[in-house]
Amino acid sequence: MSTQAGSQMQSFTHDGFELTFLDRQPASGEGDPVLMIHGFASSHYVNWVSPGWFKTLNDAGYRAIAFDNRGHGSSSKSYEEADYTPVKMASDAAALLGHLGIGRAHVMGYSMGARIAAFMALSDPDKVATLVFGGLGIGMVDGVGDWDPIAAALLADDPAATSHPRGRSFRAFADQTRSDRR
């Protein structure tokens, strides 16, 4: 699968998941690595390649790396809630760096990816040179609250049956991006 001129998706296995990623060195040769982690119901392509982040970072001399989180994009999926904790998803990001032989990287996350990046910095601080958080919700400060209304909304046969505002919001987003709601 090609996602950018000269770049091919690769994959590795961690914690029972096949995780796909894109790794591109700058034209100038080796550059400092920047690991980009996408948001909910998105993919490496939607958050990082299509808006031009990959090209911009490569043009600036950085090694650009992005992956599809478990359950997203072309990475494998699970329908077990326990597989999607921020700690497990952060361990996927750290494992990707290990797989690539990278000891330390700049880490940039958007929305859910920012939360994952924060958990990665807490669990593997030696692997994180700097952090960039984009689209970080107030849930990172106040706590995320109850996820049950979101899960119920994603699993509901009829979105009109969803009454919880947060559940409706996540359901609408998942439907708009044609995400697997299971």
Image (cartoon, helix red, strand yellow):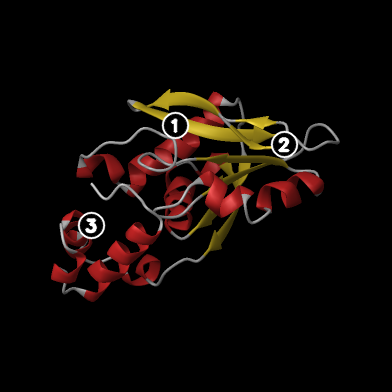
Looking at the image, residue 30 sits to the left or right of residue 142; the answer is right
From the top left corner, tell me how far across and down residue 178 is, in percent: 37, 53
Q: Residue 69 placed where, x, y %?
A: 43, 42
Task: Give the distance between the C-alpha atoms of the residues marked 1 and 3, in whole angstroms.
Answer: 23 Å
Residue 75 tag number: none
Q: Point out the tag, 2 or 3, that comes first from the N-terminus.
A: 2
Q: Residues within 10 Å of mark 2 (few under 14, many from 20)?
A: few
Measured in 3D between alpha carbons, the distance from the residue under mark 2 to the one under mark 3, in whole angstroms, is: 35 Å
Query: In terms of secondary structure, where does tag 3 sit?
Result: helix
User: Where is mark 1, residue-wise?
Assistant: 19
Q: Secondary structure at mark 2?
A: loop
Residue 156 picture quarter: bottom left
Q: Depth check: 126 or 170 in front? A: 170
- Residue toward you, 46 or 56: 46
26 above or below 135?
Answer: above
Residues marked 1 and 2 touching at CB (< 8 Å):
no
Quarter of the figure with residue 9:
top right
Q: Disc 3 designates what residue?
A: 154
Q: Residue at label 2?
A: 5
Q: Is residue 126 above or below residue 165?
A: above
x and y percentages locating residue 158 in the rendered image: 16, 62
